[in-house]
Image: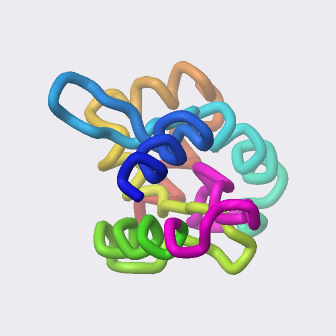
């Protein structure tokens, strides 16, 4: 099952990546934040503090035992259940900032130079 889990999380639904001896989450800031930023510019209350990073848990073709094992592993990493009923893997804004690393704010400011300061202030409260 470990080989299947590795294939699932590194290749089929690239949730993780290797960097040296470390295994890290894979983030696509544009895919994660383009829509929330657009909605935020219209009305901040339209944006949830949970941001979808991956939809692999919605795939009904994946072995349920494998999904359960990966779900349990992810749930142990957070103080909340990161899997929505629709099968999305989501993280809070603060967790994305922490797990992304030191360059998160700078990278977000490059992608969204006009809106990110207000967005950050709103979600970092």
Residue 15 in the figure: left or right of residue 74: right
Q: Quadrant of residue 72?
A: bottom left
Residue sitting at x 65%, y 42%: 33
Residue 35 in the figure: left or right of residue 122: right
* First to last magenta residue range: 47-66
Residue 65 in the figure: left or right of residue 98: right
Please tell me whether residue 55 belongs to the stretch shown in magenta: yes
The picture places residue 55, in percent across and down from the top left corner, at 68, 55
Relative height, residue 120 to residue 64 (above, below): above
Residue 115 in the figure: left or right of residue 8: right
Relative height, residue 28 to residue 43 (above, below): above
Relative height, residue 68 to residue 122 (above, below): below
Residue sitting at x 30%, y 74%: 76
Please tell me whether residue 78 belongs to the stretch shown in magenta: no
The picture places residue 44, in percent across and down from the top left corner, at 71, 61
Residue sitting at x 79%, y 59%: 43
């Amino acid at each position: 099952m470990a080989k299947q889990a590795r294939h699932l999380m590194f290749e089929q639904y690239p949730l993780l990546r290797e960097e040296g001896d470390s295994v890290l989450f894979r983030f696509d800031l544009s895919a994660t934040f383009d829509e929330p930023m657009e909605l935020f510019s219209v009305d901040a209350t339209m944006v949830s503090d949970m941001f979808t990073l991956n939809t692999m848990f919605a795939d009904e073709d994946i072995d349920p035992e494998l999904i359960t094992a990966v779900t349990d592993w992810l749930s142990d990493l957070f103080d909340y259940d990161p899997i929505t009923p629709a099968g999305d893997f989501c993280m809070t804004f603060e967790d994305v900032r922490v797990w992304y690393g030191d360059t998160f704010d700078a990278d977000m400011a490059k992608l969204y130079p006009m809106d990110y300061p207000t967005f950050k202030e709103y979600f970092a409260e």
